[in-house]
Image: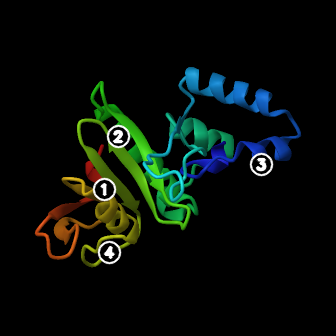
Amino acid sequence: MALQIGNLVNLQEVTANLSISRPTVETYLFVLENTFILKCISPFFTNKRKEIVKMPKVYYHDTGMRNEVMRNFQVLSMRSDAGALIENTVFGSLGSRLSITGELKFWRTKSGREVDFIVDGEQVIPVEVKYTAMRSPRIPSGIRSFIREYKPERAYVITRDCFGELTMEANSGNGFSVPVTFIPSYLLA
């Protein structure tokens, strides 16, 4: 699971790789979740024909424990998994800010459009993590697709170093626009 942070977990693939039964894998995941080692988040969907509905994504509650499993304590700038670690950090930050009625999910279409996190509560809020250098804000394609489909009141992009806000028209010509706020990841701590 340490290799899987931020990725879809295919239980059939895990059982085949480990040569153990699916019920055993499910038991292990149950134990890991209930001892607060990791968390599997479910997909957000309204259209079973177009969107992923079953496979969860996995995150660690403690990236230090994950790094120990990986035997990798290099500084972030020297890591090939820096983006995944930042996404995992955003998971922790969002999870600690959820209201009692909120749930953290992700969104992915069968054609590959994706938003890393959907805060599903009183409002539906998409949050995308883009840990690459940006000279200026630009709205990722996954957020664009989500805004067109679900028309949230606002959206966020967590970046390495970019501040800003852009407005996107949800549907051309109807006047409904969505503010997309860009926030550097170091401000989430």
| Kind of residue indicated by mark 4 | Met
N-term mark: 1 or 4:
4
**Structural crowding at the residue carrying mark 1, measured as other residues with C-alpha within 10 Å and reported as few (<14), some (14–19) or many (≥20):** few
Query: Which mark lies nearer to you, 1 or 4?
Result: 1
| Kind of residue indicated by mark 2 | Ser
Query: Which mark lies nearer to you, 2 or 3?
Result: 3
Q: Name the disc covering residue 150, or none.
A: 1
Distance between mark 3 and mark 1 Cα atoms:
32 Å
Label 4–label 3 contact, CB within 8 A: no
Q: Name the disc covering residue 93, or none.
A: 2
Element type where label 2 sits in the image? helix
Residue 32 found in image quarter: top right
Tell me if residue 140 comes above or below residue 102 in the rendering. below
Q: Position of residue 31 (x, y in %)?
A: 65, 22
N-term mark: 4 or 3:
3
N-term mark: 2 or 3:
3
Q: Position of residue 62 (x, y in %)?
A: 51, 35
Query: Which mark lies nearer to you, 3 or 1?
Result: 1
